[in-house]
Amino acid sequence: MNIDNPYGLMALWAQGDWVAKATLLVLAIMSLGSWTIILTKFLEQQKLKKQATQVDASFWHAASLAEGTEQLPADSTYRYVAESALTTEHRGRTCEQSIERALAKVQSRWSDGMTFLATVGSTAPFVGLFGTVWGIYNALVKIGVSGQASIDKVAGPVGEALIMTALGLAVAVPAVLGYNWLVRRNKLGMEHLREFGSDVHSTLEPAKK
C-alpha cells in the first residue's frame, strides 16, 4: 500500500499489528457510541422542550384536565404523566403515587446511555495510554533487534504511540463534556416535569374531595 505519510493514522492502520488495530477499533466504537448518544439525547431533549411549550401555552387553558390531556400529542411525556394521574382510581394507588411512579419511569428512560458516556469519558484515555505503551514497546523491540536507535527505526512506533494518546483524549473529552451537558439539561427538564406533576396533583385532589 502506497501511503503518503508513513507516520500518520493511515500508516498506523496499514502497518500496525493486531493489538494496535484492536485498540483503534475500540476507540472508534467508543467515539461512535458517544456521538450517537449525545445527538439522540439532544433531539429527545429538544422534543421535550417543545412539549413543555405546548403545555404552558394550552394545557392549563382547557376546560378540564381530561380535555387538556387529550389536546396533548399521543407521545407527549406530559400527557403520560397527566394520564397516570387521571387513571389513578383504576390502579388502586393515590394520585401522588401514580405521578411519582410516572416521573420515576421518565427519569429512568432519560438516563439511558448516560452510563456509557461516563464510562467512555473515564476509560478512553487509558485505552489510548495502552496503545501508547504498546507503541513504545514496539520501538524498543526494533531498537533491540537492529542494535541501533536510528530515527527511521523508532519514528513509526513512537508516532503510533503519540497518535494513540491523542485519539484517547479525542474520544474522552467529547464524552465527558456531553455527559455533563446532557445531565444538566435532563435536570432542568425533570424540574419542569415535576412542577407539572405537582400542579396536576394539586388540581385533582380538591376535585376528589
Image: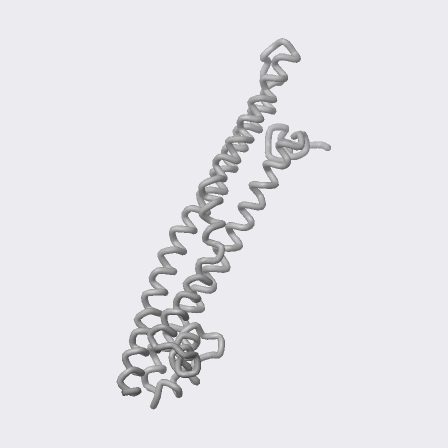
Residue 203 at x, y percent in the picture: 29, 82
The image shows residue 95, relative to residue 169, as above or below, that is: below
Q: Nearer the viewer, residue 24 or 207?
A: 207
Instruction: Tell which residue pokes out farthest to the top in this image.
Output: 147
Colour option used: one colour
Q: Picture coordinates of residue 35 (x, y %)?
A: 51, 52
- The residue lying toward the viewer, choosing from 30 and 153, is 30
Q: Is 151 above or below relative to 47? A: above
Identify the residue at horizontal 66%, vertical 30% (top origin). 17
In the rendering, at what x and y percent does residue 148 appear?
61, 10
Q: Nearer the viewer, residue 152 or 97?
A: 97
Q: Which residue occupies 52% across, 37% down?
A: 167
- Furthest toward the front, the residue is 92
Q: Quadrant of the N terminus?
A: top right
Q: Among all residues in the image, which is located at the extreme right?
A: 1
Residue at 50% x, 37% y is 168
- Work out whether residue 31 or residue 206 is closer to the camera in this orientation and state it: 206
Quadrant of the rendering where the C terminus is positioned: bottom left
Relative side of 74 to 56, left or right: right
Residue 141 lies left or right of residue 81; in this view the side is: right
Residue 67 position, x and y percent, is 39, 88
At 58% from the left and 41% from the top, the residue drawn is 26
